[in-house]
Image (cartoon, rainbow, N blue to C red):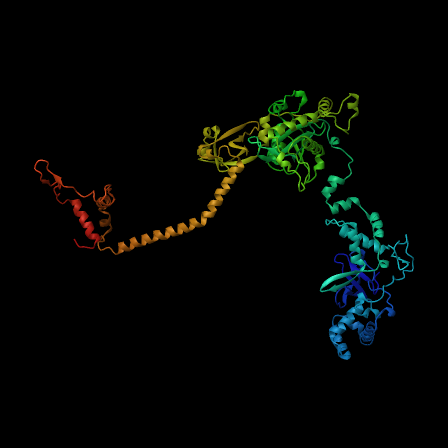
């Protein structure tokens, strides 16, 4: 039910309204927190629905106070009486018209003329009258700061529960009962403020409740202020806390305050284990990576710190044995995961020997493929995952983001590894944040990558032979006297459980886990990443000439671009392609470096493109200038052939003339000008000057043509 003079509050925006009149099927409301508010018409059923859906709450009337005239000043009483007389004599009799929007302004102006007041003053009085409860004391000036202390309205029931301990003026503060309306307010505030990502404390939420439901609101310098009611009219924090514990939903609280992922990761009930999803060794492998809590040094110079390495590990869920391991600087990425998968099928005796550790096959017997691999979504989406599924029949189960608990076995092993590293190795990170004055652990870095890998291998060997605490041992295991170590569980599971173990040639696995790409065939070779490759098969089948297949799928290792591989259709063989001479300059570079160099070249060319355009435009202009000048000279020539035949008849002779002229202009004279002057030759016997000037040749046809050409150039007639 909705009643006249009832105060309601919207939950979404904390706006409070008062019901001032009801005319079926409508009600009239005003906003009680606005500076002034004229009545608005709303549909009764809409408000009732909003109350039912908790979009509107019934709240206490902030102006329902008992004010004694004794506590008022003469000025307050006089102003109240004056304003009340205006409301009684001039407004109440026209209230039906004043409630309606149409005609309200006209009626207010009429009242203003009769009372010799401004329409603004009449609006202000009406607004205060409606907003503050439609009583005489509603017209008191500065109502929020006037009056006595105020006494709680008689609820006709004594407050239940323990009396409050605080004694003021020899009287105990009574407080309020927690009615259904108050409970709704509590639940609303908990949902709105506590179950939110702001991580408000319960004290904060309690303060929000007092602000939203138990305060007077006023504006000061344009800013909304709140005046909390006295303690006898508000619920106490203990009351709120008591009902909060009744309304508490830990699962919902954590999911709303933190996230669903964090709840699933850290707070969900643990009612099962990983082993329940397996039926023997090889059913499920878990793979994951972590960045080790240690800084390493360069293998070339122990004084150069190279940062923290990445550890990839593959573990069998059933036996907990480590089946694959990679320690390096790749990743976390597909390259790092690829190396761990490669080690998964490798002979562990040979692997350990590379690091100076001698073991027997019984100490680390794993070199198999599983049925299912549980991995992170990041590394195992795309790339060669489809090849693992289609060619090797391995099912990939990707966990959701930030759900390391779904790979709990391998995650737990990483914590063990890092814990041992912190205890033993120099350069280890001892705490997440260093404080002022703490020693920089990076300066203590001592181990290189190979030495650190040896440490991890030793810890893996130790893990494989260590008793597993809280392992769900089966009755058959107990009957066989089995001690639950990873190696024992692995061997027992192979003999007594079905399992899903398979073996594969290591090169076939590599062919399936290496990244794939597309290359194009051209006359210059097989082109991949702007590098050119050649192969025996391409030459024999004349790919470069036929160009029937414009593209071909290839497999490549981004760490070694000297070779790429073309898989055969049977999936068990491949064709090797070698880097050709034009691309040999990139031999030894990583693919990332090549791509970077190509991007840098493109950027430099793009930066120069504007200059190139300007250069082209200027060159074209210069060419046009030369051509225009030549065209002009031709038009101005006095000796133009009369026919096309005459113009082209003597091309050879004209060329000979032009050649002779060019020879005269182009001939070399290596001696200086003075030295080049002819010296006198004296006969040794007669002591007379000898004239060595060569006899003048008779005019030839060639010289005649030269003279004719010269005369034509200077415009002379023949």
Camera-side residue of 632 and 14: 14
Quadrant of residue 592 within the rendered picture? top right
Q: Is residue 608 left or right of residue 235?
A: left
Quadrant of the image for the N terminus? bottom right
Residue extending furthest toward the front:
437
Residue 56 visible in rendering: no
The residue under the point 86% across, 63% down is 150
User: How many marks on residues?
Assistant: 0
The residue under the point 75% across, 56% down is 12
Camera-side residue of 246 and 455: 455
Residue 229 visible in rendering: yes
Instruction: Check the image and report above or below for 74 versus 49.
Output: below
Q: Position of residue 222 (x, y in %)?
A: 71, 64
Q: Is residue 76 left or right of residue 466?
A: right
Q: Is residue 420 left or right of residue 211?
A: left
Q: Position of residue 116 (x, y in %)?
A: 76, 79
Instruction: Check the image and report above or below for 566 versus 648.
Output: above
Instruction: Check the image and report above or below for 522 versus 42.
Output: above
Q: Position of residue 185 (x, y in %)?
A: 81, 55
Q: Position of residue 379 (x, y in %)?
A: 63, 36
């Amino acid at each position: 039910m909705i009643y006249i003079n009832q105060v309601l509050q919207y939950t979404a925006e904390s706006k409070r309204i008062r019901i001032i009149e009801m005319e079926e099927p409508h009600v009239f409301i005003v906003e009680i927190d606005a500076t002034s508010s004229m009545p608005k018409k709303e549909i009764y059923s809409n408000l009732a629905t909003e109350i039912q859906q908790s979009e509107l709450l019934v709240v206490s009337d902030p102006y329902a106070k008992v004010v004694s005239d004794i506590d008022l000043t003469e000025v307050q009483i006089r102003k109240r009486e004056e304003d009340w007389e205006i409301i009684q004599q001039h407004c109440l009799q026209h209230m039906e018209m004043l409630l309606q929007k149409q005609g309200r302004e006209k009626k207010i102006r009429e009242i203003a003329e009769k009372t010799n007041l401004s329409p603004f003053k009449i609006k202000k009085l009406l607004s205060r009258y409606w907003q503050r409860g439609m009583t005489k004391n509603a017209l008191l000036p500065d109502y929020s700061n006037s009056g006595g202390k105020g006494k709680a309205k008689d609820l006709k029931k004594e407050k239940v529960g323990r009396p409050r301990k605080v004694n003021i003026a020899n009287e105990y503060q009574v407080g309020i009962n927690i009615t259904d309306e108050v409970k709704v307010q509590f639940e609303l505030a908990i949902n709105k403020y506590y179950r939110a990502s702001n991580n408000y404390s319960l004290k904060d939420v309690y303060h929000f409740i007092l602000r939203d439901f138990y305060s007077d609101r006023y504006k000061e310098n344009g800013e909304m202020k709140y005046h909390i009611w006295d303690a006898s009219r508000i619920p106490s924090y203990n009351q709120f806390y008591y009902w909060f514990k009744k309304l508490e939903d830990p699962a919902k609280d954590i999911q709303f305050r933190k996230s669903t992922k964090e709840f699933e990761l850290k707070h969900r009930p643990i009612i099962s284990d990983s082993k329940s999803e397996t039926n023997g060794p090889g059913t499920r492998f878990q793979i994951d990576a972590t960045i080790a809590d240690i800084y390493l040094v360069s293998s070339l110079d122990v004084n150069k710190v190279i940062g923290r390495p990445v550890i990839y590990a593959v573990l069998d869920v059933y036996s907990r044995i480590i089946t694959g391991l990679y320690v390096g600087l790749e990743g976390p990425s597909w390259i790092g995961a690829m190396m761990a998968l490669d080690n998964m099928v490798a002979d562990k005796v040979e692997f350990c020997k590379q690091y100076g550790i001698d073991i027997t096959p019984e100490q680390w017997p794993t070199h198999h493929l599983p049925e299912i691999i549980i991995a992170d979504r990041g590394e195992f989406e795309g790339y060669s995952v489809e090849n693992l599924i289609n060619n090797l029949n391995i099912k990939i189960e990707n966990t959701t983001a930030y759900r390391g608990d779904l790979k709990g076995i391998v995650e737990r092993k990483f914590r063990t590894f890092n814990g041992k590293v912190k205890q033993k190795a120099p350069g280890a990170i001892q705490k997440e944040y260093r404080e002022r004055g703490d020693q920089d652990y990076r300066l203590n870095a001592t181990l290189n990558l190979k030495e650190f890998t040896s440490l991890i291998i030793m810890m893996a060997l130790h893990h494989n032979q260590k008793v597993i605490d809280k392992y769900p041992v089966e009755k058959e295991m107990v009957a066989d006297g089995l001690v639950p170590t990873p190696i024992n569980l692995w061997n027992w599971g192979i003999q007594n459980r079905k399992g899903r173990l398979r073996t594969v040639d290591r090169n076939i696995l590599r062919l399936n886990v290496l990244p794939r790409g597309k290359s194009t065939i051209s006359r210059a070779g097989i082109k991949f990443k702007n590098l050119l490759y050649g192969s025996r098969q391409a030459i024999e089948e004349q790919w470069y000439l036929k160009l029937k297949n414009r593209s071909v799928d290839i497999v490549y290792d981004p760490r070694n671009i000297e070779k790429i591989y073309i898989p055969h259709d049977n999936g068990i063989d491949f064709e090797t392609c070698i880097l050709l001479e034009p691309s040999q300059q990139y031999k030894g570079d990583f693919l990332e470096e090549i791509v970077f160099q190509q991007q840098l070249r493109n950027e430099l060319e793009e930066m120069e493109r504007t200059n190139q355009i300007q250069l082209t435009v200027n060159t074209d202009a210069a060419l046009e200038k030369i051509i225009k000048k030549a065209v002009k000279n031709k038009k101005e020539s006095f000796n133009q052939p009369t026919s096309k035949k005459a113009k082209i008849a003597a091309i050879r002779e004209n060329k000979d003339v032009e050649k002779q002229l060019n020879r005269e202009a182009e001939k070399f004279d290596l001696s200086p000008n003075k030295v080049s002057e002819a010296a006198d030759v004296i006969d040794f016997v007669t002591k007379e000057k000898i004239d060595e000037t060569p006899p003048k040749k008779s005019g030839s046809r060639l010289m005649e043509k030269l003279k004719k050409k010269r005369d034509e150039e200077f415009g002379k007639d023949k």
